[in-house]
Image (cartoon, helix red, strand yellow):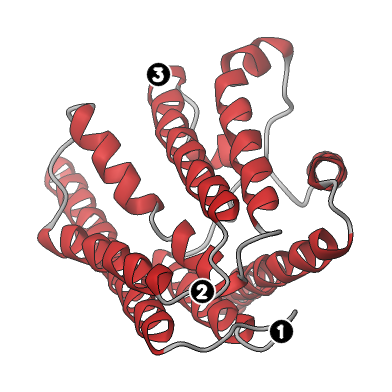
Amino acid sequence: MDTSSVTDGSSFLSLFAAISYGIASMAMVFINKAIIMQYAHSMTLLTFQQLATALLIHFGRKMGYTKAKGVDITTAKRLLPVSLFYNANVAFALASLKGVNIPMYIAIKRLTPLAVLIAGFFSGKGKPTTQVIFSVILTAVGVIVAAIGDFSFDLPGYTMALTSVFFQTMYLVLVEKSGAEEGLSSIEIMFYNINSALTTTIVGVLKGVGSTTLGFVLLGGVQVHGLNVTGLVINTAGGVWYSYAKYQQRRVKAVKVMSDLESHRT
């Protein structure tokens, strides 16, 4: 079999998976918002989404589409805190969509890297790069400016969105800790797609920019205010900068690992 054709096929599938994820993830926010606007019981929606996800993962594993390990009782007990924080994150995020417009919802969720950095500081994690620090600060400044100009400001909605950021931060910190302590990779814990860092970064940026732009016109849109638009532009720029900084950081780390491997071989 031609090796190049196998490689091309694998690259195409990875790109297709990444783009599909981006489209599905972007559509999910709008679908959830549309349902929450008509149907106030967000916990019922969450339950159905969780059941659908569990079934898709189960049948995907049975049919050979995913390589995730089967979950046993011992593993489930170890990962219970991770599951609780994840579900709390999703629950508060869904509830916040009732009062927060989509561009502001996305902007607030971009505060997660800042929260993760703060959590890492208190847990003694290594100092992040200068680019990462300034990009998350820029993102936070954008949220504050945008919130000041938000005509549809909803205190309960903002509170729930910020609470969601807290639980998402705890979830990410626990995922990393669980993987380190239990010998489980974050891929096995979070069932992430296996794609290149560049592909994942670009798709994530496009998804964020696309969702923010569409949020101005879909599902009631947003009352345009100069401060709100300026803040969202600043927030988006900070998100793009952060994604680029993290990609550069991963690339440098990958090069260092390869260099270390080569030195050990020789």
Q: Earlier in the sequence, mark 2 or mark 1?
A: 2
Q: Residues within 10 Å of mark 2 (few under 14, many from 20)?
A: many
Q: Which marked residue is nearer to the observer: mark 2 or mark 1?
A: 1
Q: Which marked residue is nearer to the observer: mark 2 or mark 3?
A: 2
- The amino acid sitting under disc 1 is Leu
In this view, 225 is above or below 9? below
Q: SS for tag 2?
A: helix
Q: Earlier in the sequence, mark 3 or mark 1?
A: 3
In this view, 184 is above or below 215? above
Q: CA distance from mark 2 to mark 3?
A: 32 Å
Q: Earlier in the sequence, mark 2 or mark 3?
A: 3
Q: CA distance from mark 3 to mark 1?
A: 44 Å
What residue sits right under mark 3 in the picture?
181
In this view, 192 is above or below 154? above
Q: CA distance from mark 2 to mark 1?
A: 15 Å
- The amino acid sitting under disc 3 is Glu
What residue sits right under mark 1 in the picture?
218
Residue positioned 23% across, 59% down in the render: 249
- The numbered dot on residue 186 is none
Answer yes or no: is residue 242 visible: yes
Image x and y of residue 206, in percent = 50, 80
Q: SS for tag 1?
A: loop
